[in-house]
């Protein structure tokens, strides 16, 4: 994350923290993020917060979707190593499909299905064993969705 983006995110965190009436130590207790890290983040001295940190702060500080999206888009764009799908999916709190908020069990099953698909034999067609694994993972995903 560039210094400019980091500073913008830090200012947003500071503004929302103060609006909630939280001290650094109170926010640290609620998020599990150290008070010293929060101070450095707010002052623009700490660069590249992970998606987990960004989502945790967004959740506790009740950032608007627009504020969080702008921050996360900037984080993802500026990262040089790329962002793992797992990290994005697992830490996104308001992920919806057909206007239904998706729970962590569904997210895990979605990752299982993706993993089965991408780790299959590597050919464009699936072996029978791979087809069965994909069908079972898809069925578990469907059941998880309808169980919510």
Image (cartoon, grey):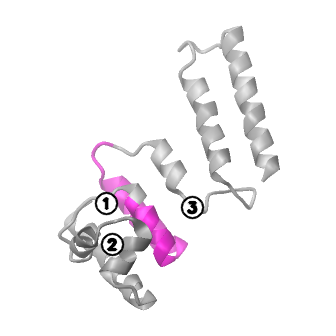
Examine the rendered structure and indicate whether residue 84 appears above or below residue 14.
above
Mark pair 1, 3: CA separation: 17 Å
Mark 1 and mark 2 residues within 8 Å of each other at the beta carbon: yes
Q: Which quadrant holds residue 45?
A: bottom left
Q: Residue at x 22, y 71 (%)?
A: 36
Give 32 or 129, whichever is nearer the viewer. Answer: 32
Q: Nearer the viewer, mark 2 or mark 3?
A: 3
Magenta stretch in the rendered image: 53-81
Sooner in the amino-acid sequence: mark 2 or mark 3:
2
How far across and down, in percent of the image, does residue 29 sit?
Answer: 39, 72
Q: Residue at x 80, y 40 (%)?
A: 143
Q: Decide if residue 77 is on the left or right side of residue 125.
A: left
Q: Decide if residue 114 is on the left or right side of residue 139.
A: left
Sooner in the amino-acid sequence: mark 1 or mark 2:
2
Mark 2 and mark 3 residues within 8 Å of each other at the beta carbon: no
Can residue 70 be seen in this snapshot? no
Mark 1 closeness class: few <14, some 14–19, many ≥20 residues within 10 Å: some
Q: Which residue is mark 2?
A: 9
Mark 2 closeness class: few <14, some 14–19, many ≥20 residues within 10 Å: many
- Tag of residue 49: 1
Examine the rendered structure and indicate whether residue 106 appears above or below residue 4.
above
Sooner in the amino-acid sequence: mark 1 or mark 3:
1
Q: Which residue is mark 3?
A: 93
């Amino acid at each position: 994350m560039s210094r400019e983006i980091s500073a913008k995110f830090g200012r947003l965190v500071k503004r929302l923290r103060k609006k909630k009436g939280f001290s650094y130590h109170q926010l640290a207790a609620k998020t599990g993020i150290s008070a010293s890290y929060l101070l450095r983040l707010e002052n623009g001295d700490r660069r590249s917060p992970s998606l987990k940190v960004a989502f945790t702060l967004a959740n506790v500080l009740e950032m608007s979707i627009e504020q969080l999206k702008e921050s996360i888009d900037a984080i993802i764009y500026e990262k040089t190593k790329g962002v793992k799908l797992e990290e994005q999916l697992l830490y996104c709190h308001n992920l919806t499909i057909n206007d239904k908020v998706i729970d962590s069990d569904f997210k895990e099953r979605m990752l299982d299905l993706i993993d089965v698909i991408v780790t299959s034999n590597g050919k464009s067609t699936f072996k029978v064993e791979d087809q069965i694994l994909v069908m079972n993972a898809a069925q578990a995903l469907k059941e998880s969705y309808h169980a919510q």
